[in-house]
Image: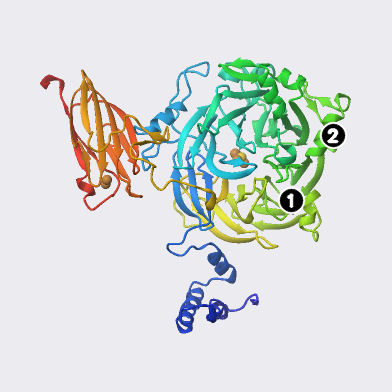
Amino acid sequence: MRFATGCKLVSFATVAGMLLLPGCARHKTGTAAYAGESNAAAKVIAQRKLTPADVVGALKTFEPPGRRDKYLMFASGGQGGQVLVWGFPSMRLLQEIPVFTPDSMAGWGYGGVGDQVLREGYIPASKMGPRQRIRWGDAHHPALSETHGVYDGKWLFINDKADGRVAVVDLRDFACKQIVKNPIFYNDHGSTFITPNTRYVIETSQYSAPLGGAYAPLRGYKQDYRGEMTFWRFDRKTGRIDSKRSFAVEFPPYWQDLAVSGKLASRGWAFCNSFNVAMYHGNDMNGAPSFEAGATRRDTDYLHIIHLAQAIKVFKTGSFKRINGFPVIPLKTAIADHILFFTPETKSPHGCDVAPDGRYIIVNGKLDPHVSVYSFKNIQAAIAAGPTTWRHDAYGVPILPMRKTIKARIEVGLGPLHTQFDNKGFAYTTLFIDSAIAKWSLGGAYEKMHPDVKPWSLIQKLPVNYNPGHLAVIGGDTEHPTGQYLVALNKWSIDRFDCVGPLYPEDMQVIDISGPKMRLLSDTPLCVGETHYAQIIAYSKIHAWRVYPKVGWNPLTQSVDPNAPMPGNERIVRHGNKVEIFMTAVRSHYTPEIVKVNQGDQITWHVTNIERTPNATHGFAVSGYNINLTLNPGETETFHIHADHAGVFSFYCTKFCSALHLEMTGYLVVKPRATH
Ligand code: RUQ
Ligand code: CUA
């Protein structure tokens, strides 16, 4: 069926109505009923002035009431500090997983487990200054755990750029379990990226500084400032990062940017690009240029090539120094033991992505309209060619000649930032300045997949609205991409939505990449976070609990809590001024529901939601004491109150759990000192 361009909407609607008629023989429903529906559809199409492209977009992404999405998209929430989980491709927001920022809907950070996890991520009192209660995050890159280079649906990692932290989310209950603070650096950016079996989670620093949070004046930049890459060892048994088996490698004080782990052909290696190799350190109101000019004044920066397998060996032999107690392989050792190599890249590039077969490292130009394709094989050959063929940077790091390492340069357009891949041998790159997605063809072994197209060439540019940062293809950064759909994560929305004041939502656009040409399907505004980066996984790979496995479940230990209040053993126990409360919650009451303490008492309060019914979540909020928990069926939480204010305080259930939800309440009675 072909639609003449410029055809009248009404005639298109008629055609669409006919299209909506199913092959009647296969359908039990009467033809007459369908004919009626399709007439109605044709009418809606005409009334709403929908184009054929609109109708296809709607039909490809709409899930009818009650039907579920086949994919989940895990997106970082940027400065919101959280992880957002979307049904994909319908783009229905299903979950906000609180991570770095307190979240009152999820009861995260107002007593209970959230406080414990957030506290772990505070900056400890050390050389890095006084203890800081960090209560927000700039969440950049979610990384789903992988087995043999494909998402396994078990964990999700996410970094906080602002304070150099990495968090672990368990995908059995979609809850954050751990936040680790990088002990040698404040900020990160090339994070989190994982190795193909999730042994290591990579976290790379961004803006150089003295390691360990020490002080050094800016005039000592070249000697005293450094970058680094941290390899956090992840332990699948405990579901935690094990800092004792983790280490870092010291880098020169260039600004390291996006990082990535090698895979297949390049397994055992890691890569990251950099900017400000000029080591410019700022306009001190002295008439010097600003960073944007000073940091970009050289023609090239360096792609960092890190032999991770070699770094692990060196770490195991103990050839490291400790900074704030954390093992760091010194730059000198990294050079002498052949852990670190550079090769030039055009200045101030951005994303660094590895093709699915691991043979090519794609560096996106940002200021250069090309993507540069480095060949891993060529890099190895340049290393093997030996020191006489290398140059060295000011610190002695070998620089492999670019003309040897580079395989192809493809002119894609203005502002190339990030690249992902499909299952047909194509790559997709966001063009920030052009406001477009470029589709281009991979060469090498991929040529077999598309014999009719020229390798390493631009195929199509599709405008997006506007200024995309990252993009995500289903499985698009794994060894086996699925392809099919792509989402462009656009920073600006300008004229796409009704105006809601001067702070604009960002825009996520779903694009169909299953055919020879990309086509735009839908817009989804996002206002509770930044559309920073996302990964998309088949829902069939996720095995989330519908309810916690047993009553009394502690979500931090993922086991029954020995202190969990159980039905029949609810009680209040007092030892001097220490009061311990064991409380249960079930529709629609708490036991006990009157709690009497004395002013100045220290209360340890445990609550178990003893429900087994999926969805029967209760809340628990205490007025006046900043307590707010969310208790899912089976869950136990523990919090502390120093009852320093006398008075009568209600506690109540914040979730509309039943018809008698308002009656799900009780009193915390704090008797003033004088009367007890
Ligand atoms: S990188 S600016 Cu994800 Cu494009 Cu942080
Ligand atoms: Cu429980 Cu409302």
Q: Position of residue 9 (x, y in %)?
A: 56, 77
Horizontal arrangement in the rendering, residue 553 relative to residue 146 (left or right):
left
* In front of the other: 385 or 301: 385
Q: Are there few (<14), some (14-19), or many (20+) residues within 10 Å of tag 1?
A: many
Q: Which mark is residue 344?
A: none
Q: Is residue 251 visible?
A: no
Pick out the residue farthest to the right. Answer: 388
**Which residue in the protein does label 1 denote?**
412
* In front of the other: 351 or 614: 614
Horizontal arrangement in the rendering, residue 374 relative to residue 606 (left or right):
right
**Which residue in the protein does label 2 denote?**
381
The residue tagged with tag 2: helix, strand or loop?
helix
Disc 2 from disc 1: Cα separation: 28 Å
Q: Position of residue 51 (x, y in %)?
A: 57, 71
Horizontal arrangement in the rendering, residue 406 relative to residue 27 (left or right):
right
Number of callouts in the render?
2
Tell me the quarter of the picture where residue 346 sits: top right
Quadrant of the frame with the N terminus: bottom right
Report the image quarter containing ligand 1: top right
Q: Amino acid at mark 1?
A: Val
Q: Are marks 2 and 1 in contact (CB under 8 Å)?
A: no
The residue tagged with tag 1: helix, strand or loop?
loop
Quadrant of the frame with the C terminus: top left
Pick out the residue farthest to the bottom. Answer: 32
Q: Amino acid at mark 2?
A: Ala
Q: Position of residue 282 (x, y in %)?
A: 64, 26
Q: Earlier in the sequence, mark 2 or mark 1?
A: 2
